[in-house]
Each structure stands twice: as structure tokens, then as C-alpha cells.
Amino acid sequence: MKKKLIAGLLTTVLALGVVTGCGSEATSETTAEETTTEETAAETEDAAEEATEDAEATEEAAESEGVEAKGTITVAASATPHAEILEEAKKILAEQGWDLEVTVFDDYVQPNLVVESGEFDANYFQHVPYLDSFNEEQGTHLVNVGGIHYEPFGIYPGTKSDLTTLEEGDVIAVPNDTTNEARALLLLQDNGVITLKDGAGLTATVNDIAENPYGIEIQELEAAQVSRVKDEVAFVVLNGNYALEAGFSVAKDAVAYEKSDSEAAKTYVNIIAVKEGNEENEGVKALVDVLKSDEIKEFINSTYDGAVIPFE
């Protein structure tokens, strides 16, 4: 039916072109305009057909398997590993009749805003402390509907590869958002680089550094930018996903990293977040169930070399 409607509109456009041509001289310019109009209309029809075919693909696949099409789930995600894990989940959800649409964002703000606005059903990129901080600062109403994995935070080499060789003036780059900066500083403290004031915890900043025996400088950068200065600083402290994007392996490259049984690893589990009130959305519940499935856990364990660990 959609193709017939497009064809009808195309016929109308061409007919108008002929009427316009009859009211003026048949110049080469008019001919060129008519040709352009025909080409544009053809391109529009092709694009519409392609979009229709894509939208119907999941439904046809489900019907061929005897599964009723249930709808579309839209998710905003970071590229690595979140979008990659979602692409694996997409296959399983398709077998259940769901079409999973994943959009990749390269920052930590827009994925929350588009869920808050209702443009997306859910997002997958953050941990609970960041979510809580974001809600408080931005006035949003996002909630956790399921922990999926955690990514050990690590210290990675830049111009140096041994923490004991640090000296005054050396720079270590860390993420500048509240919870991730605290996590980086706590990891540096655990490895003897700095000492934080008593009581400094998940909100620690550089102002909470009590002792700095090496005389290092902490460079605070937006999380996505930290890995990009690795050739300019002594060390970088990275979130697991950005370490992967930079080509680092936790097991092989990290100078030090959070252990799997650490409180930090448990605290910073990456979650599926939705707008408050959508916790019982059927598509969201299906998504969380699949992401917690044995199939996805096996995919994570076999793909990320310890940089990503399924949350039990």
C-alpha cells in the first residue's frame, strides 16, 4: 500500500511538471529541471522503499519463525562495549519478535536527555552513582531497571609504564565528571600515587588530595578525551569502555586496575536506565532479560578479555 501511495505522489509531481512546462518555452533549462525533478522523485521513492523494507524486515523474520512481531525498542548507548553487546542481544530479541534499534552517542549527557524526553525507551552506558548524580544536577527522572556488566577502572601507560618512576611535574589524566573522577582518584590512592583526605569517597576531587609524594599534576578531562592524550601524559586513568576504544587490554596493558571483588566494581555496575514510570514497559523488560541471559554473558566473557565482566 505504501509503494502505491508513493507511486501516486510521483505521478502527481510529474503531472505538475508537464503543466508548468506547457506555460513556458520548451528551453533546455526547463528540460534539465524536469529531469532533476524526475531523479529527485525517484530517489525519494527508493529511500521510502528502503525504509519500508527495513521496518518490515524484523516483522517478516518473526513471522517466518512463527513469532508475532511485538514492536520496536529504542536504546541510546556508548559505542564500546554497550552498542556491541546490544547488537548481539538484537539477534535474540528478533527471535522473540522485537526490533532493537541502537543509536550510539559519544558523550555522557545526551543519552540521558533523550530518554528523559521520551525520544528513546532506554539507555545503556552508565553506572548508578553517575545516574544519581545526573538526576540531582539536571533534574531528570531516570531509574535503574537492571545491572548488566561492570568495567574495571584502570591506570594505563602514557609516556611512562611504571608508577614508581613518577616524578614532580608528571601529569596523570583522569575523567572530570563527579563519580568517575572520584573512582580514578581512589584507584590512584590504592596504588600509592596520592593520599586522599579522610572520608573522601565517591565525590572526591583533586581538592581532596591530602598527600602528593611524587608531586604529580592531575589533568581533568571529559571522559571521552582522556585516552586521546595518552601520548602527552605519564599515565591515563580510563573507564573500561574508553580503554577498549583506545586499544588497551585490561589484562595485558593496565598498570593497575580494580579487582572483580572490589567494592568499586560492585558499585559501578553498568545499567539499563529508563524514565521513571516506564519500568514495566514490555520491551524494556524483554531487553533486560536478554542482556542478563547466559548467551549474552558468554558473549561478554569471550569477547572482552576481562575488560567487561557480566554482573550477577
Image: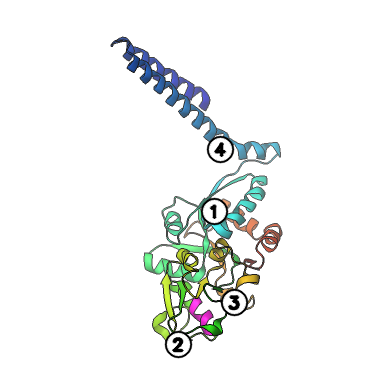
Secondary structure category for the residue under label 3: loop
Q: Main secondary structure of the magenta part?
A: helix
- Amino acid type assigned to the residue bearing label 1 in the image: Asn
Report the mark closest to the observer, 1 or 4.
Answer: 4
Q: Nearer the viewer, mark 2 or mark 4?
A: 2
Q: Residues within 10 Å of mark 4 (few under 14, many from 20)?
A: few
Q: Residue 68 vs residue 278: left or right?
A: right
Q: Residues within 10 Å of mark 1 (few under 14, many from 20)?
A: few
Left or right position of 87 against 29: right
Q: Amino acid at mark 4?
A: Ala
Q: Residue furthest left?
A: 24
At label 2, counting other C-alpha atoms closer than 10 Å, the crowd grade (few under 14, some 14-19, many 20 or more) is some
Which is in the foreground here, disc 1 or disc 2? 2
Magenta residues, start to end: 183-190
Given the image, on which type of amino acid does mark 2 rest?
Asn
**N-terminal of the two: label 2 or label 3?**
2
The residue indicated by pointer 1 is 281
Q: Which residue is mark 3?
A: 255
Image x and y of residue 47, in percent: 49, 32
Which sits earlier in the primary sequence, circle 2 or circle 4?
A: 4
* Labelled disc at residue 55: 4
Q: Which residue is mark 2?
A: 212
Q: Give the x, y percent position of residue 302.
A: 70, 61
Secondary-structure class at tag 2? loop
For residue 172, above or below residue 297: below
Q: Quadrant of residue 208?
A: bottom left
Front residue of 26 and 168 = 168
